[in-house]
Amino acid sequence: MDRDEVLALEDLSVGFVHGGTSTVLAHVSLSIRRGETLGLVGESGCGKSTLGRAVMRLLPSNAAVDGEIRLLGRDVRAMDDREIRRLRGGSVAMIFQNPMSALNPVLTIGRQITEALETHTGLRGRAATARAVELLHLVGIGRPVDRVHDYPHQLSGGMRQRAMIAMAVSCDPKLLIADEPTTALDVTVQTQILDLLAALQEKLSMAILFISHDMAAVASVADRVAVMYAGRIVEQGQATALLLDPAHPYTSGLLNSVPSVDGAKLARLQAIPGNVSAGSAEAAGCSFHPRCRFAVTGCDAEAPPLADIGDGRASRCWLATEDWRPDAAARGLAT
């Protein structure tokens, strides 16, 4: 095992049993090393949040999970309930999409932070409260001595997100799963949150799994990027190379869908036609072919493998080695 490897997924599949079984993730393999940020991108419904919840063992009881999930060399799926409770909030923590629904509305922000400290560090009473104040200060919340006594509804959206981050990093996790951490925030607050995550990562040497559909946000924080479509990884590689020269039509489509300004004029968006199809992780052939303008005869019959295309990159496309790829440099997305 790589001593710096924090998380490793091997051939992970997740389905939900309801009458039949609907496959949401299919044969996903990923790894994240200490101090590294892996951006996981794709449209809503592609399975990104399901992957994060699978790592945390937060899937519902009707979930059928296959494959390996190793955190710091330990098999997460083999842990008993006591071990997994110690894992959550300790070695691995998660920032959820909507802090207003993720935070408990009847407990103060301070109490929700001290609860994690009591569980994982043994701090109690004034010592735990003092640490909660330090954490609120660390994430940039003003007047933390007062805010520690506030309830979630008394904070703005950006402050609630900061409070969620304070809870998540309270026990110095080795892995932070950030699930759409800037959704519903204005651009200025988004930038502040991304800068905060980068600063905390440097301070704590955390690995971060950054889940998002926002390619611009991913470009600003990720060291590597994995692109997910219909429950499968369709492309992965170093962030700069992948964003400048996408090797899969879906990645290219996502980049073309990012608003950009050409001089003083807003460039026209090039939307991807159609939607992610339910159950397309199980479909024959390439799952993206119904929406792909580069599809050729045979794309609907045989699924391409996630093939090595050199320089540590991989793409799940029969055309990955062909000279069709667009130049994304003009979009200003490269880090």
Image (cartoon, helix red, strand yellow):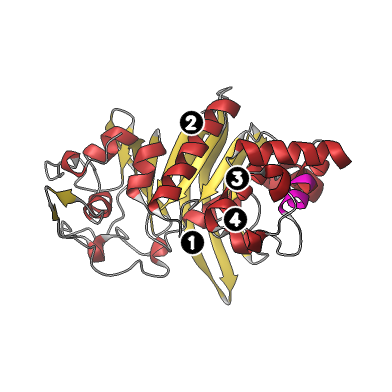
* First reached walking from the N terminus: tag 4 or tag 1: 1
Q: In the rendered image, which residue does mark 1 sit on?
A: 24
Dot 3 crowding, Cα within 10 Å, few <14, some 14–19, many 20+:
many
Q: In the rendered image, which residue does mark 3 sit on?
A: 165
3 is higher (above) or lower (below) than 153: above
> How far apart are the alpha carbons under marks 4 and 1?
10 Å
Q: Hey, what amino acid is under mark 3?
A: Ile
Side (left or right) of 120 relative to 297: right
**What residue is at 50 percent from the left and 34 percent from the top?**
32
**What residue is at 18 percent from the left and 58 percent from the top?**
295
Secondary structure predominantly adopted by residues drawn in magenta:
helix
Q: In the rendered image, which residue does mark 4 sit on?
A: 65
Q: Residue 185: which quarter of the image?
A: bottom left
**Front-most of 331 and 265?**
265
Q: Hey, what amino acid is under mark 1?
A: Val
How many discs appear?
4
* First reached walking from the N terminus: tag 4 or tag 2: 2
Mark 4, mark 2: which one is toward the viewer?
A: 2
Circle 1 — which element? strand
